[in-house]
């Protein structure tokens, strides 16, 4: 597998509010009638699912350039990278035969086969573009439905392995970068408000992860009793409101403590440009401050796309791929630091 | 300082209450504080529950829809309802009908709703679409009657009748 971040459209840093809303992600779960759900199914069942999906895809021109990766045939490191690139979930990377991920050339659409549900369609866009993501997922879903009999009940909608997803089987999430709200200790208040709207707040890699580098993911919890449009409008509304609060907090930082923040941002930049070894956690933290500095206009010359790419490049899997044989943590820390220095070399402090 | 209620254990919960500008202080042990329903407090557990959902699911079931002692199995995949309660996962799409009486109340309590109103598929959902459209037209009819727009009401009534006849034929 080759490393090529240009294929990942979601890193572009374009789209509405892209400075704060990194991505809009949407996941639609579908199951085939009567075939046991993956958590309990036998190899013969998951194989049948994979075959049926492949056949459906080959009948539609739309999917002709999609690339199929069979998970058990991949190296663990390559699976890890697909997770870091947000093209599949950590759960799919685990064990189990006949698991697959089928990805569009632009990385915007991916189909996870035999994860918790038979098919999970993901659409991932840069910036706040929930409506657009829904149009894409809806289109893919309609094409698949022409050839596959999805488990559906009039009362309960789309039937899923876990009843927490039943109904629309839709999970929409927006990934937000909220450094100003985090460093001013306002996140706990924001979080409790978000929860009141029936939305959840999580760290960058989804369930069970912490908010590294001030990245937060907000997503819907309720999947039945609301239309897809309602769910997406709610997420969009809340994400917009939080982005506004973040901008407001940034304005206040500028107004109240500009010299302190300016100093902090330049020091951060200094470390990134000079460190010989750096851990993932430290790099994420410092890149977060760099991103804030860019947003505040202190470091106006660093492109958003580069900052987005760096967040993926510094992850252990990606670095390991670059390093090859050497698999020590120290080796990765040295490589991480040198990669960051190299990427930031065109930008320097004479621009103060 | 000892707990003001049981006077046995050390007081490690201190509560200050302000009621109508009167400030009062109570010092309790964790056990006694737990009995006070008006007080919310949290303790950090020494372990984290492995599967929180499956722990919650049995609490969400209702006695009236699920007779105690019965443990039905799915007619398609064979998993028992108790398997679902311990794993949080259903076995197949037929489980939803096999366990309907038990599942629907749980879904209602998780989501606050138990009726799908979202997307319906083109190919196999046309009947359902017609039914939803009839419901929508009936609501519109009520409104037009209320507004005394009888011409439009007559039009809607005929349209609903035609749609119902058409749906009945299928």
Image (cartoon, coloured by chain):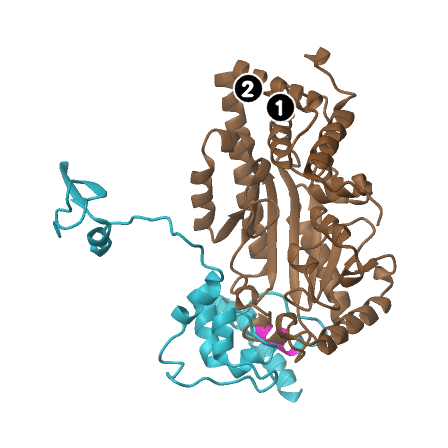
The residue at the point 65 percent across, 64 percent down is A29
Q: Is residue A131 visible?
A: yes
Q: Is residue A130 above or below residue A303?
A: below
Of residue B53 and residue A201, the one placed in the foreground of this image is: B53
For mark 2, give the secondary structure: helix
Q: Which residue carries the number 1 mark?
A: A293
- Is residue A175 positioned above or below A156 on the image? above
Left or right of B100 on screen, residue A94: right
Q: Position of residue A133 (x, y in %)?
A: 69, 52
Q: Which colour represents chain A?
A: brown
Determine the residue positioned at 69% across, 35% down. Answer: A330
**A92 and A142: which is toward the camera:** A92
Residues at marks 2 and 1 touching, judged by CB atoms closer than 8 Å: yes
Q: What chain does mark 1 sit on?
A: A
Magenta segment:
B127-133
Left or right: where A240 falls relative to A137: left
Mark 2–mark 1 Cα distance, whole angstroms, equals: 8 Å
Which tag, 2 or 1, sits closer to the chain's start?
A: 2
């Amino acid at each position: 597998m080759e490393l090529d971040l240009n294929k990942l459209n979601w890193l572009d840093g374009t789209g509405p509010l892209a400075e704060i809303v990194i991505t809009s992600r949407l996941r639609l779960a579908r199951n085939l009638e009567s075939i046991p759900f993956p958590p309990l199914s036998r190899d013969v069942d998951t194989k049948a699912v994979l075959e049926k999906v492949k056949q459906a895809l080959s009948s539609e021109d739309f999917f002709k350039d999609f690339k199929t990766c069979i998970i058990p045939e991949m190296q663990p490191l390559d699976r890890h990278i697909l997770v870091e690139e947000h093209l599949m979930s950590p759960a799919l990377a685990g064990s189990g035969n006949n698991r697959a991920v089928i990805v569009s050339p632009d990385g915007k659409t991916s189909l996870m086969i035999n994860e918790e549900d038979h098919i999970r369609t993901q659409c991932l866009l840069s910036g706040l573009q929930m409506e657009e993501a829904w149009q894409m997922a809806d289109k893919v879903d309609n094409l698949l439905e022409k050839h596959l009999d999805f488990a559906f009940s009039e009362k309960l909608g789309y039937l899923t392995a876990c009843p927490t997803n039943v109904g629309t089987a839709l999970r929409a999430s927006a990934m937000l970068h909220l450094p100003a709200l985090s460093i001013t200790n306002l996140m706990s208040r924001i979080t409790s408000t978000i929860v009141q709207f029936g939305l959840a707040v999580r760290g960058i890699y989804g369930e069970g992860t912490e908010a590294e580098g001030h990245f937060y993911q907000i997503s819907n919890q309720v999947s039945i009793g609301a239309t897809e449009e309602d769910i997406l409008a709610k997420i969009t509304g809340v994400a917009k409101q939080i982005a506004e609060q973040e901008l407001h907090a940034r304005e206040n930082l500028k107004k109240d403590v500009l010299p302190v923040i300016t100093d902090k941002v330049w020091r951060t930049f200094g470390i990134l440009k000079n460190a010989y070894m750096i851990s993932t956690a430290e790099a994420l933290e410092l890149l977060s401050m760099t991103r804030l500095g860019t947003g505040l206009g202190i470091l106006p010359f660093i492109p958003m796309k580069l900052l987005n790419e760096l967040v993926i490049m510094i992850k252990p899997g990606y670095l390991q791929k670059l390093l090859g044989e050497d698999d020590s943590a120290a080796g990765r820390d040295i490589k991480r630091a040198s990669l960051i220095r190299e990427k930031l070399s065109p930008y320097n402090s004479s621009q103060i | 300082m000892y707990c003001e209620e049981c006077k046995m254990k050390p007081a490690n919960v201190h509560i200050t209450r302000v009621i109508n500008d009167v400030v009062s202080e109570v010092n309790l042990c964790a056990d006694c504080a737990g009995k006070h329903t008006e007080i919310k407090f949290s303790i950090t557990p020494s372990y984290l529950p492995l599967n929180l959902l499956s722990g919650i699911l049995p609490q969400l079931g209702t006695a009236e829809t699920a007779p105690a002692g019965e443990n039905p199995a799915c007619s398609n995949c064979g998993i028992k309802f108790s398997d679902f309660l311990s794993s949080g996962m259903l076995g197949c799409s037929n489980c939803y009908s096999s366990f309907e009486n038990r599942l629907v109340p749980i879904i209602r309590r998780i989501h606050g709703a138990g009726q799908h109103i979202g997307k319906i598929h083109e190919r196999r959902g046309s009947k359902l679409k017609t039914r939803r459209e009839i419901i929508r037209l009936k609501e519109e009819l009520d409104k037009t009657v209320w507004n005394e727009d009888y011409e439009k009401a007559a039009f809607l009534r005929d349209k609903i009748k035609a749609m119902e006849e058409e749906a009945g034929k299928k």
